Image (tube, rainbow, N blue to C red):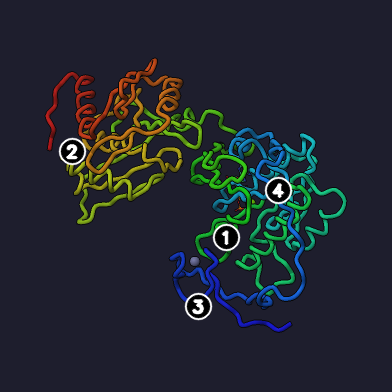
Amino acid sequence: MARAADRFVCQSCGAVYPRWIGRCDACGEWNSIVEEAAPEAVPKGLGSGKGRRVTLTGLDSPATPPPRRPTGIAELDRVTGGGLVPGSALLVAGDPGIGKSTLLLQAAAVMARNGAAVAYVSGEESPDQVQMRAKRLGLADAPVQLGAATAVRDILATFDEGTAPDLLVVDSIQTMYLDSLDSAPGTVTQVRAAAHELIRFAKRRGTVLVLVGHVTKEGQVAGPRLLEHMVDAVLYFEGERVHQFRVLRSVKNRFGPSNEIGVFEMTDGGLAEVANPSALFLSQRSGGISGSAVFAGIEGSRPVLVEIQALVAPSPLATPRRAVVGWDAGRLAMILAVLDTRCGLALTGKDIYLNVAGGLRIAEPAADLAVAAALVSSLHDRPVPEMAVVFGEVGLSGEVRPVSHSDARLREAAKLGFERAFVPATRGRRHDGIALSEVVRLADLVDMLVDASDVRHGVKETDSR
Ligand SMILES: Nc1ncnc2c1ncn2[C@@H]1O[C@H](COP(=O)(O)OP(=O)(O)OP(=O)(O)O)[C@@H](O)[C@H]1O
Ligand SMILES: [Mg+2]
Ligand SMILES: [Zn+2]
């Protein structure tokens, strides 16, 4: 077999270079370029041989939507849009140690107990290790077929004969390899080719294929991004390892809505479903403290209340610190600029820390107003009224814009006992059980927060600025 010259491939995005470079031009990743054997040359053009006619149909074929296989884990079913679709491939990606194997072993066990034929192939752990986890989670009795393998050829030889399993979990795709390729396991070439073969098997046999993918920062192993276009659905398992909350987020779904979330709690007995995330995210809130605001957010189709904490402190540094956890740093800079320019708050020389409590990551612009409330509250050392929620998008001229799903946000707040909401202009709309404080301009919010605490303290303090 004549080997073509080696090439250099970015393990993050798959870009190919003739020589090694320190930083990938395509995706900007550092140290992600690794030498790989070039794939065997493919014949140019079609070559000889006649193609088969493709069967063509209309768009209104009577085919029913693919039947789904509920996993029995409600939060997982929610994220996948109602269960797993036979013949489809799902990628579950996440940081090392976040709980991917735990989640999938639990799903495999529950489905197996409900009568599905389930196989779990581990390329990272020995059967002993997986059995120990199963024992710890109380799943040892579930009829799951467990195997340890890394050669795709062996996996296919095992499952492609007789009846194929209904669910095949492969943990992880970065450990799988094809012996027909020269590259090492974990390289772009291997990960793509191994995924391709496994996905073809799944489609052919109507098996649900679940691939585990590691998110890697070092670029030593090919990341899940490479596979996103090959699979039908992509779920990211997120969370801070120090927190017990885990969020499973769908970023792509060919059979359902994307950006839906499922919330779990990591416990000694494995991942527990969290049916009411708001109560969990707010459980550690201590009332009456300045620098805290409750944001009424929407994740996917579900309202989630979460505490946003800010600390504004005098800075000894020439360039004050800005640290953000769970929100976009650029967005924070924008809110600070608007508070400074449009509301006259002196924030420029201050250290500013912002934290979304519980380890949730928020992407919604609707959080702007809640972030601003937490910042103003900390700066003036006045608590936001304790039983109030805040939401609204802030524009560059300091105007507060309406956001979607405000009824759902308010309903959730009312359900959790909140009595007041700082919201964008409502155009006369009302909400039972919640007093609405309309914020037309960001400067109004500053006034309201200062006034609100004056009423509480019974004194009219003057601004110390
Ligand atoms: N004995 C234990 N008791 C309680 N929790 C445990 C125990 N062992 C592991 N865990 C929890 O499970 C987590 C690891 O879960 P898991 O192995 O499923 O993660 P993973 O994402 O598959 O990791 P990897 O990247 O190593 O494959 C740990 O971070 C820890 O929180
Ligand atoms: Mg694992
Ligand atoms: Zn790249």
Quarter of the image where one finds residue 368: top left
Mark in front: 4 vs 2: 4
Count neighbours of disc 1 (C-alpha within 10 A) and say few if under 14, some if 14 to 19, many if 20 or more. some
Q: Which amino acid, mark 2?
A: Cys
Q: CB at mark 1 closer than 8 A to ligand 3?
A: no
**Residue 254 x %, y %:** 60, 46
Task: Answer with mark 4 or mark 3, whichever residue precedes in sequence.
Answer: 3
Name the secondary structure under disc 2. Answer: helix
Residue 39's image quarter? bottom right
| Label 2 vs 3, first from the N-terminus | 3
**Between discs 2 and 1, the one toward the N terminus:** 1
Cα separation between marks 2 and 1:
45 Å
Q: Is residue 247 left or right of residue 46?
A: left
Mark closer to the chain start, 4 or 1:
4
Question: Ligand 3 closer than 8 Å to the CB at disc 4?
Answer: no
What residue is shown with label 3? Answer: 20
Residue pointed to by mark 2: 343
Residue pointed to by mark 4: 57
- Under circle 1, the secondary element is helix
Q: CA distance from mark 3 to mark 1?
A: 20 Å
Nearer the N terminus, badge 4 or badge 2?
4
Residue carrying label 1: 226
Residue 344 screen position, x and y as percent:
15, 40
Of residue 405 and residue 321, the one placed in the foreground of this image is 405
What residue is rendered at 77% in x and 44% in y?
A: 166
| Circle 3 SS class | loop
Is residue 159 or residue 463 the one in the foreground? 159
